Each structure stands twice: as C-alpha cells, then as structure tokens.
Amino acid sequence: MTEANAALKPETLYGVETGLTGEGSVRWNLGLFYNRVRDPITNVTIGVGPGTFPVAGFIPAGGLRQRRNAGEIKAYGLEGDTSADLSPALTVRAAFSVTHARVDGGSLAPQLTDKRPAQAPALTVTAGARWTPIERLSLDADVRYESKRYEDDLNLRALKAGTSIDLRAGWALSPTSEIYLAADNALNTDLAVAQTADGVTSYAAPRTIFVGFALRR
C-alpha cells in the first residue's frame, strides 16, 4: 500500500550533457550526460506488515510505502543511436542507453543511500530494420532489450531483464495513406513490469495484433 503525502516539495533537475553527431552513409549520435535530481519524489518504504500504522491503519504482510522527497539522485551515462541505408530498399537502425544511477537518501531516507532508483534499468538497447521489397510494401522489425531493474526503493524485488520484438507490415494505398498489420510483443514474451511485496508479478501486454489504416497529411 502506498500513502499520499500533502507535504511534498517539487523535485528539481540539474544536468549537463554533451555529444557528437555524424552524417553520411551512416548517421549517428553519441552523448554523455550527468544529472542530479534534488528532492526526488519516490515511494519510500516506511514499515513492513502485518501491523497497524498511524494513517493507513492495519496493513497485511507486504508493507507500507509513502510518497516522499528522498534526498537526491545522481545519474550519469552514455547514450547513442545510429541508422544506415544499406540499399535503396533496406534501412537499419539501433540505439542504446547506459545509465549509472544511485540515490543519496540523506537524513530523510538513509536506508536508500547507494540504492538504485526503482524501475531504472542500467542498460537499454533497441535495434530495427525497414525493408521495402516493392514500392507499396514496407516491412518493419524492432527489438528492445532492458536489463534487470528493481521494483522497490530498497532494491529487494528485482524485475528480470527482458526482450521484446515488434513486427509491422504496411501497404501504401496512396502517398499519404496505408493499411497495416502489426504485432507487438510478437513472441509473446513475459515481460515483468511490477511486483508486489508478496510476490505478485505484473507483466506487459502479451502478443497484440493490430489491423489498421493510417492517414498522413
């Protein structure tokens, strides 16, 4: 259970970033960043049930969290993307983000110091391709990988790394319209997105098929 908190202060982000860009047959961007978030708003564990707490009352096994300002978060990392036309009919693309992030809970939440922020993967990688075998037909495939991350502020409940694949086929009816068939999470992979304190795991949407019409102006 998570309590609200009317005493929250706005969180503030300070950061700097720099990067390089390349143009040509291969297009790419590469950037470095350093960020500090002061007074970050996060769910802070304040008690473990079963037990009775002042505001929430009786809490069963699983614990109680409250929205709080928790010191500051420092994060730095590297991110980039690239794309290239391998032929008039084939384009490939890829991107990545590597982030080292840690919490300094200070005196308000010392138990969070040196913990990783919740729901923050250290590595994200995407890659994809578009193939146009004939003028009207376009075929797209995209893959996304996220490394292990933590569900909770204390880094006790880990969400496994996961990979998903999205597929799409489009048929142009005119220069501004097309019909398409798409499959998100085409391999029907179980991708964990949340987990409760008593071990109940929530997953992203299973394989989802779309048939649609797109109009671009």
Image: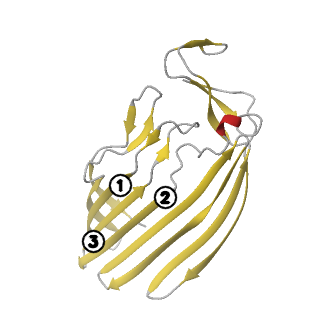
- Residue furthest to the left: 134
Image position of 157 with respect to 47: above or below: below
Tell me the residue that label 2 is attached to: 123
Estimate the x, y position of residue 60 in percent, counting from the top left: 50, 15
Of residue 102 and residue 19, the one placed in the foreground of this image is: 102
Q: Residue flagged by tag 1: what amino acid is it?
A: Thr
Tell me which colouring the rendered structure shows: secondary structure
In front of the other: 166 or 111: 111
Camera-nearest label, 3 or 1: 1
Residue positioned 50% across, 22% down in the render: 62
Cα separation, mark 3 vs mark 1, equals 23 Å
Name the residue rendered at 27%, 76% in the picture.
132
Secondary element at image label 1: strand
Give the vertical position of 80 relative to 103 (above or below): below
Side of 123 relative to 33 (left or right): left
Instruction: Look at the picture and state if 216 lies above or below 160.
Output: below
- Residue that badge 1 annotates: 163
Residue type at mark 3 is: Ser
Figure quadrant of the C terminus: bottom left
Task: State yes or no: discs 2 and 1 in contact (Cβ < 8 Å).
Answer: no
Which numbered mark, 3 or 2, is in the foreground of this view?
2
Mark 2 lies on a secondary structure that is strand
Label 1: how many Cα within 10 Å (few below 14, some 14–19, many 20+)? some
On the image, numbered disc 3 is attached to which residue? 138
Q: Is residue 66 left or right of residue 94?
A: right
